Image (cartoon, helix red, strand yellow):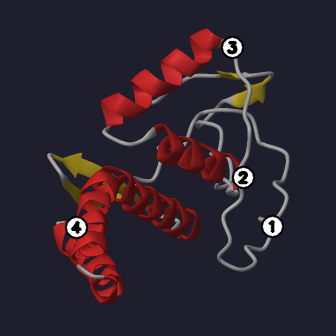
Amino acid sequence: MDLTPYLEGLRADLAATAAPGGPEILRAAELLSHSLEPSARLALLEALSDAAAEITTRLTDATVEVRLRGRDADLVVTQIAAPAPALTEPAVPDLPLPPVEGGDLARLTLRMPEALKTHVEQTAAAEGVSVNAWLVRAVTTAITPRPAAPVPPVGGAWSGKRVTGYFQA
């Protein structure tokens, strides 16, 4: 997504507002618009990133991210593969998901050990997503009800956190 047309629209609006003030005011508006372009571009990217995070929280099988290519922003939708069932003992029933009310985003300050923060950043980068998108996906996955636990193997039984028994081929 090319952000330039939006920035040019802002620049044109500023010039139109300054035009009645005369050539000096128009020149000042032009200089101001060029100075504000990086901040306006960053504000647009932040709005796109917040929108992508909000959309991701409402999707159950995909994530939406904003990726930068030069001065352009690309919206990328990634399907999430269903996780393979783990061989664990039956889980305690999950609580229902809290209802998502409105489209408002909330800020959250998260404190974590520096080593964990570094690991999260590396994992998000390896997956090609922002840290925010990765954390939103991790929290959503953590509160999403999991499928029922698998049935023990033929001739086996659950024993603590291990499966015991035998396997027939």
Decide if residue 1 is in sight here.
Answer: no
The residue type indicated by label 3 comes to Pro
The residue type indicated by label 1 comes to Pro
Viewer-proximal residue among 124 and 89: 124
Asked if the residues shown at circle 4 and circle 2 are in contact, with their CB atoms under 8 angstroms apart, the answer is no
Asked if the residues shown at circle 1 and circle 2 are in contact, with their CB atoms under 8 angstroms apart, the answer is yes
- The kind of secondary structure element at disc 2 is helix
The residue type indicated by label 4 comes to Arg
- The kind of secondary structure element at disc 4 is helix
Nearest-to-viewer mark from 4 and 1: 4
The residue indicated by pointer 4 is: 27
Instruction: Residue at 48% x, 67% y: name it.
Output: 51
Could you say which disc has been placed on residue 127 in the image? none
Instruction: Residue at 46% x, 63% y: name it.
Output: 47
Could you say which disc has been placed on residue 98 in the image? 1
Which image quarter is the N terminus in?
A: bottom left
Query: In terms of sequence position, does the residue under pointer 3 or pointer 1 come before the other?
Result: 1
Which image quarter is the C terminus in?
A: top left
The residue indicated by pointer 3 is: 113
Pointer 4 local density, CA inside 10 Å: few below 14, some 14–19, many at least 20:
some
